[in-house]
Amino acid sequence: MNRSLKKILIVTWSIVAIGFTALLVYGISNQNGVNGIFDSYNNSMNSDMTVQKDENVDVNNIKNINVNFSSSNVIIKTTDESNIRIIQKSSRTLTNDEKFQIIKKDSDVTIKRGNSKKFFNIFSFGNMQEIIEVYVPKDYNANMDIETSSGNIEFDADIKLSNVNCKTSSGCLVSKSNINATDINLEVSSGDISLGTLITNNYNVEASSGNIKINSLAGSGKLDTSSGNIKVQYKDIAEYSEANASSGNIDLVIPEGLSFDFSGECSSGRVNSNYDLNYKNKKQNEATVKMGSGPYKKISASTSSGNININD
């Protein structure tokens, strides 16, 4: 490798490192955290984007809406209309092959990218400068499955469904709205999950490398992150809630008047609470507490490296 090429690579990666550092500092200092970054990013993207395709599809007798994209941000909104409306925006002109397709089969409708060629440059990170807006009829209450790689998923309106499945790799899952569903499964790798209100019978929320934050949670289920923090404020617990973090802190806020039976354990850390905990050892890394008169909701929390905080 000649010296000129080495210099170019050093300068290029220095610019990338500075950019990531600035983004990290902004995220820490911004009072809205990941939402603040997400909003700023979307605002800057939208200003440079034009509509590439706008299409409606009838959802009469549809039981499953599937949204599948790569290298795109997917935003779920609602509409008073009876049809789904899909708008594809991009900062560059897309070919017909790159524009989305709609496939209807029996009771399913699938919205997916066409046969596109991957576009890449070091500053846009693939085709990240693209947004897919999906407007779902307000009276649609069946199932929704969303999957994207190298992109974010955002819920930008209150929505009530039967089953919700969301999966994104190298992206975040964000909502400031109310998500209400019978069963909810949310999976993120290399990104954060930041939600407003999540109301469900059963939930499974996983972030393989990122934080989980839910401002209001109701139902029963599991919260897992392999490298990140968990911060949850419960609105109610149906039967049980499990929170596990391999490397990170767990903060749980319990609603007033809830009867619960809690157990917490951290390998390297401490269990803290404004409740009167029963510690199992002098390290104070294992503790239990039972509050109320029953029936008791089961709450368990564990982390390998981090603290556990449970408070009202």
Image: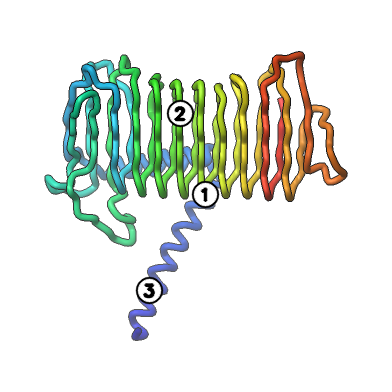
Three-letter residue code for mark 2? Ile
Q: Is residue 120 above or below residue 142?
A: below
Q: Residue 38 falls in which quadrant of the image? A: top left
Residue 152: in sight, yes or no?
yes
Residue 180: in sight, yes or no?
no
Q: How far is mark 3 from mark 1, CA to CA?
A: 28 Å
| Residue at the front extreme of this rendering | 106
Three-letter residue code for mark 3? Leu
| Residue at the bottom extreme of this rendering | 2
x and y percentages locating residue 163 in the rendered image: 40, 25
Task: Name the mark on residue 184.
Answer: 2
Task: Name the mark on residue 209.
Answer: 1
Q: Measuring 34% from the left and 85% from the top, which residue is drawn there?
A: 2
Q: Earlier in the sequence, mark 3 or mark 1?
A: 3
User: Which mark is in front, 2 or 1?
Assistant: 2
Task: Name the mark on residue 180.
Answer: none
Q: Secondary structure at mark 1?
A: loop
Q: Which residue is mark 3?
A: 9
Q: Secondary structure at mark 3?
A: helix
x and y percentages locating residue 92 in the rendered image: 20, 49
Q: Measuring 51% from the left and 47% from the top, which residue is drawn there?
A: 208
